[in-house]
Image: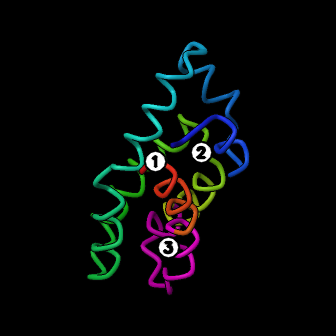
Amino acid sequence: MITIDLLKESGADVESGLSRCMGMEDFYLSLVVKALQDDNFTVLKEKIGTKDYDAAFEAAHALKGVLGNLSLEPMYTSICEITELLRARSDVDYEPYLKALYEQKAVLDEASK
């Protein structure tokens, strides 16, 4: 179960995220769970794999907004790096960036089961 304490331990700026949810912890936590299920995580990986950087950028940019609004650091930092590389259509090895993002996501995914 995802908790405020777990989010804090993972580096999330919970106070900032909660302020966007008018301090309603249950609402905030439900949004975090919903964010982790966002299809753009799958789209991002698939589109980078096929080098469709335009579609990958759209997915990354959408995730950047969601993760930023929920203050889910360090996932937000990782997606910002990926977004900026994709914005520049950089043909780099995205694997280290994706690995960091998905490892951070996996911790929260496991807790949400």
Q: Nearer the viewer, mark 2 or mark 1?
A: 1
Given residues 86 and 29, the one toward you in this image is 29
Q: Say which element carries label 2.
A: loop
The residue that disc 1 covers is 112
Classified by dominant secondary structure, the portion drawn in magenta counts as helix
Q: Of the two numbered discs 2 and 1 on the same chain, state the one appearing first in sequence.
A: 2
Region of the chain picked out in magenta, as a range: 84-102
On screen, residue 90 versus residue 62, left or right, reads: right
Q: What residue did someone put label 2 on?
A: 72
Residue 12: image quadrant is top right
Inspect the image, locate mark 1, and give the three-letter code of the amino acid beneath it.
Answer: Ser
Q: Secondary structure at mark 3?
A: helix
In the image, is 81 to the left or to the right of 34?
right
Above or below residue 107? Residue 76 is above
Residue 4 spot, x, y in % from top left: 64, 34
Q: Which one is in front, 46 or 85?
A: 46
Q: Label 2 sits on what residue type?
A: Leu
Q: Position of residue 70 (x, y in %)?
A: 54, 36
Residue at image position (46%, 48%) is: 112
Specify the amino acid type for callout 3: Leu
Measured as percent of width and height from the top left, residue 93 is found at 50, 86
* Image mark for residue 98: 3
